[in-house]
Amino acid sequence: MRNLLLLLVSLFSLSLFAQDDLPVGHNQFIAEHYNSLDVAGKMLAYDHVAWVSSDSIQTLSREELSSYGGQWFCYLDSTGQYHALYGAYDSAYTLTAHYVVDSTTFAVNRTFQSFDTTLAVLFAKAYNLALARKREFLGPEDHLRYNHFIFLSDSTINVHFLPAFQPNGVMIYGAEQHYSLTLDATQIIDSTEYFNEYRGYKSDPDQQITIAYDDLDYTSIGAVFFLMYYEQHFKSIRILTKNYITTFIRGKNNKGSWIHAVRAEPKAKKKKKRKKKDNP
């Protein structure tokens, strides 16, 4: 992920730019891209753990599923193992099923070992508080399907919402919400809420697509996640921001590089001078 190749080329002239020609805030753009890349990478793993473990919960008996209230979370423990928790929250967390997912093979195994539900309670409280804030931001008429991602840091619980792969096969971008909460999950202390109309594409491996974030100075978490998550559905994906076009080039060995091309302003067309006609 950290193999960043920066090619500063004009999209029109294909010539290299000197340092003086870089947009103001270039270093900040690169720093923000790394931050977005770091979170998006964690989201990819989180999503895969949720996906492989959700197949297992479908095999539970009706009696076991009767306790499932739709509250599910994933987390990475200190030993490098992923956990997927499925249960219900109502002042306390009732665990329906607990799965351990190998971080390398993503093999899923159910565990019946005793489990401290403290973390699940905190995640459930954080999710509910962030979800209420998200609904307030988007409004009551918004019914788009979203995915959620929850991560624990040393000082905060972080809840992220991104549009999910929709049932009609459309891959949506143009909105994302990110919330940081206190460790007791009682207060939102920081938030980034973005909406600029829902737009999307259906899978087409022969198509080169562009996801436009012209109003942003940086590649957002949602934009980077969209490119990484859906890259196999298209020939290529480009992220368009205020000053750059960003894409990811994957080589034969499956390793790749990020490329950021400076958006060059098209040259203004010179007006042709009209010849004055001599008066007869």
Image (cartoon, rainbow, N blue to C red):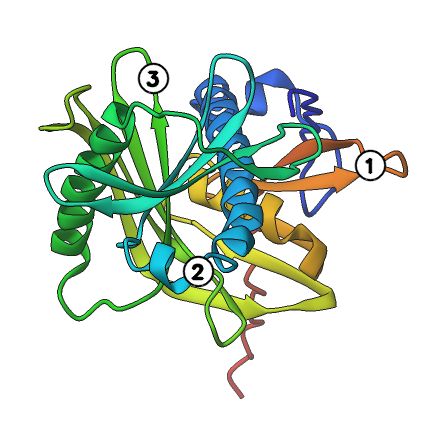
Tell me the mark number nearer the camera, choosing from 2 and 3.
Answer: 2
Which label is found at residue 279?
none
- Of the image marks 1 and 3, the number of the one nearer the N terminus: 3
Measure the alpha-carbon separation of dots 1 and 2.
Answer: 41 Å
- CB-based contact (under 8 Å), mark 1 and mark 3: no
Image position of 78 (left or right of 104): left
Crowd around label 3: few <14 · some 14–19 · many ≥20 (10 Å): few
Image position of 147 (left or right of 13): left
Residue 53 locus on image (x, y percent): 53, 46
Residue linked to disc 2: 61
Residue 35 locus on image (x, y percent): 46, 24
Residue linked to disc 1: 254
- Whether residue 238 can be seen here: yes
User: Could you say which is closer to the camera, residue 24 or residue 231?
Assistant: 231
Position of residue 145 relative to residue 252, above or below, is below
Residue linked to disc 3: 153
Position of residue 131 relative to residue 106, above or below, is below
